[in-house]
Image (cartoon, rainbow, N blue to C red):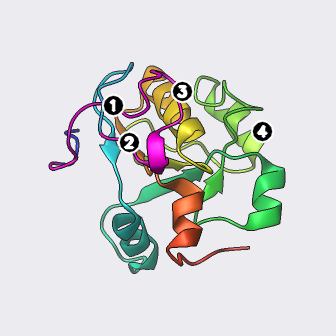
């Protein structure tokens, strides 16, 4: 999957890997894994969450924050929770183990998945783990929860 055009070049933060992006922004990169990551804007995620369920493409939005974070803040509507810190191997375990651990089936490896967290750092790590596990249609919302709330995105509790 090609990255979204117009995203600019260069990485943010200069830390590599899990460095904190300046001002919560980061540009597309071809980090470890089997391809580019699509970078999603607030407007694109908002449009995705407000589109009708009859949409021909199903994109799974994945919140990688810890469960206690979601219980205190809520989540982007329709997102599922697969915490990257406490369950980093989730994308590498057999499907039945994934479902047992998380309570829902793992998305298919060819399905489009979109990761977010609080500020964009953990979502980048989760996207890399998913790519390493063979997922090919991987996206990130680097603005993540902080931007979502600041811009008035709807919250599911």
Is 132 displayed left or right of 38 in the figure? right
Measured from the top left, where is residue 86 in percent x and y? Answer: 77, 32
Q: Along the polypeptide, which appears first: circle 3 or circle 1?
A: 1
Is residue 20 shown in magenta? yes
Give neighbour class at mark 3: few <14, some 14-19, many 20+ (Cα, 10 Å). some
In the image, residue 6 lies at what x, y percent? 16, 50
Mark linked to residue 18: 3
Q: Point out which mark residue 11 bears.
A: 1
Residue 86 as seen in the image, left or right of residue 28: right
Magenta residues span 5-27
C-alpha distance separating marks 3 and 1? 11 Å
Residue 26's disc is 2
Give the mark nearer the N terminus: 4 vs 1.
1
Sequence-first disc among 3 and 4: 3
The label nearer to you, 4 versus 1, is 1
For the residues bearing labels 2 and 3, Cβ distance under 8 angstroms: no
SS of the residue at dot 1?
loop
Spatial CA span between label 1 and label 2: 6 Å
Q: For the C terminus, which image quadrant? A: bottom right
């Amino acid at each position: 999957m090609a990255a979204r055009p117009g995203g600019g070049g260069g990485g943010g933060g200069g830390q590599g890997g899990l460095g904190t992006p300046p001002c919560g922004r980061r540009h597309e990169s071809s980090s470890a894994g089997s391809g580019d990551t699509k970078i999603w804007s607030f407007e694109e995620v908002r449009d995705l969450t407000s589109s009708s369920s009859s949409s021909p493409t199903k994109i799974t939005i994945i919140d990688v924050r810890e469960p206690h974070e979601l219980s205190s803040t809520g989540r982007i509507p329709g997102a599922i929770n697969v915490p990257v810190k406490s369950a980093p191997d989730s994308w590498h375990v057999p499907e039945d183990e994934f479902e047992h651990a998380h309570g829902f089936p793992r998305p298919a490896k060819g399905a489009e998945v979109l990761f977010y967290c609080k500020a964009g750092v953990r979502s980048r790590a989760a996207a890399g783990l998913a790519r390493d596990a063979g997922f090919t249609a991987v996206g990130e919302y680097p603005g993540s929860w902080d931007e979502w709330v600041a811009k008035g995105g709807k919250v599911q509790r």
